[in-house]
Amino acid sequence: MRYRVLFPSFIWFLTLVSCGQPAQKAEAVAPVSAQTSEKTVSAPAPDTLPRGVVIKQVTCLADPSTGYALYLPQTMKPGKKYPVVFFFDSQARGTMPLEKYKDIAERYSFIMACSNNSKNRMDAVTVGAITTGFFKDVLQRFPVDPKNIFTGGFSGGARVAIGVAIQDPRVKGVIANSAGFDPRQEPMRKEVCFVGLVGTEDFNLAELKNTQRELNTNGNTNDLLLFNGKHDWAPLNDMDKAFLLLWLEGIRAKRIEKNDSILNASYKTDQKEAEKILHGKENAIVQASACQLMDLYYTDLKPVDTYREAMKKIAGGAAYKQATAREEEDGKNEQAQQDVYAREFREKDIAWWTQEVQRLNKEAQVTKDKDKSTYDRRLLAYLSLVAFMNANAALNQQALSEAAHALTLYKLVDPTNSEWAYLSACLAMRQQDQTTALANLDEAVKLGFNDLDRIRVQPEFQPLLNDNQFNELIAKIKPL
């Protein structure tokens, strides 16, 4: 029987329960009880938890099997409520975004929390239950301003954050890192501010550009921030810009108290950059983007008329019209090429794919055209995703020869990714080849595989739980 690749749905049907409610710092574990009933628990005072440090695990009182990482800003004051960002990481790495962005939380006085349970490969019902408990626990126990609730996430976690923002009327903004959605199929309320972040080599770049176009049509306040990089959490400066827009929108809506010091400093920095671009040699699209940023971020808060007029002039010019048309056409062509690769994935043999991957790698390295180089790298990243999806689907459907083909291509296109080696170990166990399985698992660990929970519950590895070589190998893994 021919197997089918099961791509993840963009829609999460989540019913959320309404609530009444520079130097690295050491992680802390929250001293909370896991025995109290949901109905009888009283919210503990936030002063019992440390501020200014990433708390690795706060256990949900209603469900002790779930929890989240938490960051409470040092600037918190008794009796005051604060905005919150509920983060979701694709691999349930709760501390990842909090450690990375804690300085931003301090700057804007935001609480941050990230689920330690929600991750890729979970069904929507499970994710919905985790998210419901996550929201309810944070909102009941900490001084969150119910008028300033935001969601954010990376990759599959961004899709969860988007789904929550669509379903839950309390959410006022979403930060979608490396994944978008189709607003025509999943309408988002106009009052929700959307900020997308994506690397120039990310296979989801075209998707997020399409998301931005549709949100512009729908009238949603939104921005798309591009950074030099691949499919990963955004750099600090870019994420700071995402928080800034949510913060400024809150000020405009009179949900957040204005801080003139932060506002003036941000405006001065962005104004300086905009003037540099407008008086430099940047192309029309870059100049237009600089003007749009000033208008989008600072309307009703700072003078922006000059940039509106400059934007009208640029947008009316032939250079801008040609550049935007070319950019949209390039996006369509990239999507078409991705579709071709998806269709040909199982039709072409490894020899053909080896030649194609070598061509893409060579072009990406030798071309002097930066756009062409990043285009080729995005196609390689897309092939990595397709290989993973096909390998995973084939293994789930016991199509072992198809899984072997997909994993051979996965290794070819993305050799430093630990996932091809991990799935190859699963395949070898299905084929009753323990020696090869352990060798592939060892390679996965060398490449950075570190999901101990996953490896311990993986059905294929259950026969190895008492094997000395297996246990020596997983002892090398540094937990998430």
Image: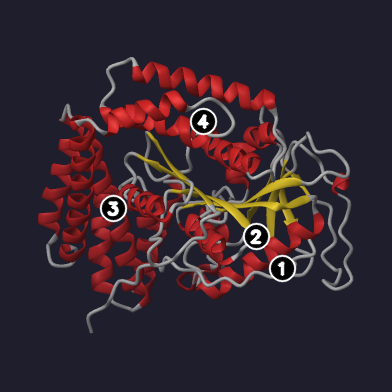
Residue type at tag 4 = Asn
Q: CA distance from mark 2 to mark 3?
A: 34 Å
Please rate how many residues cluster around mark 2, counting C-alpha atoms within 10 Å: few if below 14, some from 14 to 19, many from 20.
Answer: some
Which one is earlier in the sequence, the residue at label 2 or at label 3?
2
Dot label at residue 106: none
Please rate how many residues cluster around mark 4, counting C-alpha atoms within 10 Å: few if below 14, some from 14 to 19, many from 20.
Answer: few
85 is higher (above) or lower (below) than 437 = above
Q: Nearer the viewer, mark 1 or mark 3?
A: 1
Which one is earlier in the sequence, the residue at label 4 or at label 2?
2
Which residue is under mark 4?
A: 237
Which residue is under mark 1?
A: 18
459 is higher (above) or lower (below) than 468 = below
Q: CA distance from mark 1 to mark 3?
A: 39 Å
- In the rendered view of the protein, which quadrant contains the N terminus? bottom left
Which residue is under mark 3?
A: 382
Which residue is under mark 2?
A: 170
Residue type at tag 2 = Arg
Residue type at tag 3 = Tyr
Which one is earlier in the sequence, the residue at label 1 or at label 4?
1
Please rate how many residues cluster around mark 3, counting C-alpha atoms within 10 Å: few if below 14, some from 14 to 19, many from 20.
Answer: many
Label 2 close to label 1 by CB (< 8 Å): yes
Q: Nearer the viewer, mark 4 or mark 3?
A: 4
Name the element at disc 4.
helix
Horizontal placement of 303 versus 323: left or right?
right
Q: CA distance from mark 1 to mark 4?
A: 34 Å
Residue type at tag 1 = Ser
Q: CA distance from mark 2 to mark 1?
A: 9 Å
Residue drawn at the location 31% of the way across and 15% of the way down:
280
Residue drawn at the location 41% of the way across and 34% of the way down:
292
Closer to the camera in the image, 303 or 39: 303
